[in-house]
Amino acid sequence: MVKVSIVIPVYNAQDFIKDTITCALGQTYPYKEVIVIDDASTDETPAILEEFGDKIVYIRNEKNMERSFSRNRGVEVSTGDIVFFLDADDLWAEDYVETVVNNFDNCDIVYSFPRSLIDEKGRLLRTSKKRIPKDVGELIFSGMVGYPSASAFRKSVFLGYGDNVPREDWEIFIRAFLKGLRIKILDNNKVFIREHQKRTSRNPRFFTSTKKIYEEYKNVVPQLYRPYLTFHYAETAMRFGHLLEGWRALVSVLLERPSIMLNSRRLLSVLKRGFRIKFS
């Protein structure tokens, strides 16, 4: 039986971390270890972690080093062949790990497309009905992957999360695809993402990091997928109020591949975000 490692980075998550660790320990897959990297929390997180005793591998950073460092450190000390990541505020179905392990044939990475959002009490808020493309490349360059809680890697090919890249969870999939790693997408609704005000996607840094990644990869992305990357950059710019920048990028997409707008989701996104009137 393949051994798996579950890496949980945590920083000041006293409201959620107990439920998250309990979820990891309660997975039906038996051959596992749970590694918690405490990024120098200053709340009650350390006391909560001590309650689990030797059920977890507990490592505390000497100072706050951010989530990429913590995830990578967790992989370094792991002993499993497959590494799972679980953010300190998210949850899984109890058979999530078992399902993913059973789908790890002939691939290097398994991503379980998350559809369910939960509130701060763990109650279901909504379930996404979004259609996802069958082409893994289109999915990745459209910015539709990334949640670490939905990501599992063979340790032997793990590339490491990039430092100082707020969208490091998306960027690692771009690198993996460009390096030819085999990526499988599951759509089984077994990952539950917690919705709250501190989510990265609500922060203006989400746009600046998207722009940084776009600028870094736009000239090395295969031509087939470049319009998807550019469109994602365009709609993100529009969402954060950078309309001129967004429209310039969108025009370049339309000149290269106008058929991309036949997708109703993309069309609605532009109609929703691309037209804003500001009154003084």
Image (cartoon, rainbow, N blue to C red):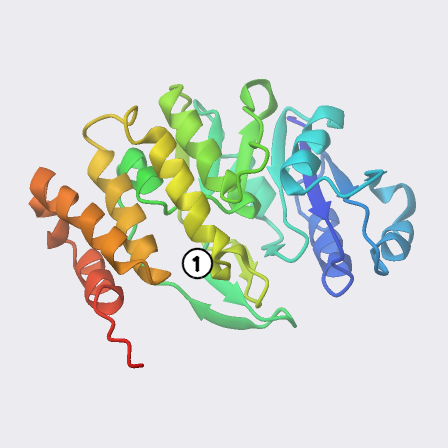
What secondary structure is found at the residue carrying circle 1? loop
In-image side of 63 versus 171 (left or right): right
Toward the front, the furthest residue is 280
At a point 72% along the width and 33% down the height, the residue shown is 74
Residue found 28% across the figure and 55% down from its top: 235
Q: Quadrant of residue 264?
A: bottom left
Is 244 positioned to the left or the right of 33 in the image? left
Provide residue 17's location: percent of width, then percent of height: 75, 57
Query: In the drawing, does residue 190 fall left or right of residue 131?
Result: right
Where residue 173 sits, quadrant-wise, is top left
Q: Nearer the viewer, residue 181 or 40?
A: 40
Residue 194, position as x, y percentages in the image: 57, 62
For the point 26% across and 45% down, which residue is it? 133
Q: Is 37 rendered above or below residue 12?
A: above
Q: Quadrant of residue 216?
A: top left
> Residue at 74% of width from left, 58% of height from top?
13
In the image, residue 11 lies at what x, y percent?
74, 51
* Image vertical order of residue 59 relative to residue 128, above or below: above
**Amino acid type of disc 1?**
Arg
Viewer-proximal residue among 205 and 22: 205
Crowding near pointer 1: few (<14 within 10 Å), some, many (20+)? some
Position of 14 compared to 258: left or right?
Answer: right
Q: Which residue is mark 1?
A: 115
